[in-house]
Amino acid sequence: MIIKVLNAVLIIFTVFMGLKQGLAMIGQKPEMITMFSRWHFSKTAIIINGVVTVLSALMILFPRTFLLGNFLMAASILMIICFSLYGRDLKGAAIEVPFFLLNLVIIYLQHPLAK
């Protein structure tokens, strides 16, 4: 029971962060443009990445799309980690690692409402 409650809290946090970051990308926030323009992302690519992030966050909420949503979000985070490491930005990569691991922990614990 405690594990399910903890997992639900982790899921809510993950969804909140995913929506926050995704909407920041869609809204073309300056910090997002700065980060992604280092990797030569166009504004359209940033918006598409934001839409994928928002959709994956919403998919995590539902048991049927839970796994796919987590995989999409983990893939997005892993992409950012890889680009950060490619650009020798260890601090940027290190910031993303806990969020990547959080998705893996949530996948391991499974959806709290699943049978």
Image: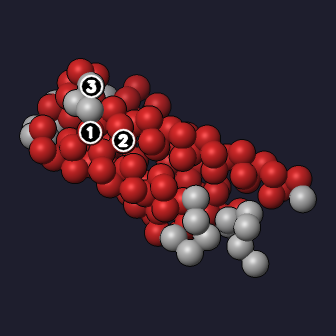
Q: For numbered disc 3, what is the local secondary structure?
A: loop
Q: CA distance from mark 3 to mark 1?
A: 8 Å
Q: Residues within 10 Å of mark 2 (few under 14, many from 20)?
A: many
Residue at 56%, 53% in the rendered image = 103
Q: Which mark is residue 26?
A: 1
Q: Amino acid at mark 1?
A: Ile
| Circle nearer the N terminus (2, 3) | 2
Residue at the (50%, 38%) spot, across then down: 17
Are the residues tagged 2 and 1 within 8 Å (C-beta)?
yes
- Lateral position of residue 12 relative to residue 42, left or right: right
Labels in figure, total: 3
Q: Circle 2 is placed at which residue position?
A: 22
Q: Residue visible at 72% across and 52% down?
A: 8
Circle number at residue 34: none
Foreground residue among 85 and 28:
28
Residue drawn where x is 74% and y is 63% of the image: 112
Q: Is residue 113 above or below residue 49?
A: below
3D distance between C-alphas at marks 2 and 3: 10 Å
Task: Give the image location of residue 58, x and y in percent.
Answer: 48, 55
Quadrant into which the N terminus falls: bottom right
Q: Which residue is at the far right? A: 1
Q: State the separation of the CA atoms marked 2 and 1.
A: 6 Å
Question: How would you rate the neighbour count of disc 3 (Cα within 10 Å): few for under 14, some for 14-19, many for 20 or more?
Answer: few
Which amino acid does the dot numbered 3 rest on? Lys
Judge whether 64 appears above or below 76 on screen: below
- Rendering quarter of residue 83: top left
Label 3 sits on residue: 29
Q: Is residue 74 visible?
A: no
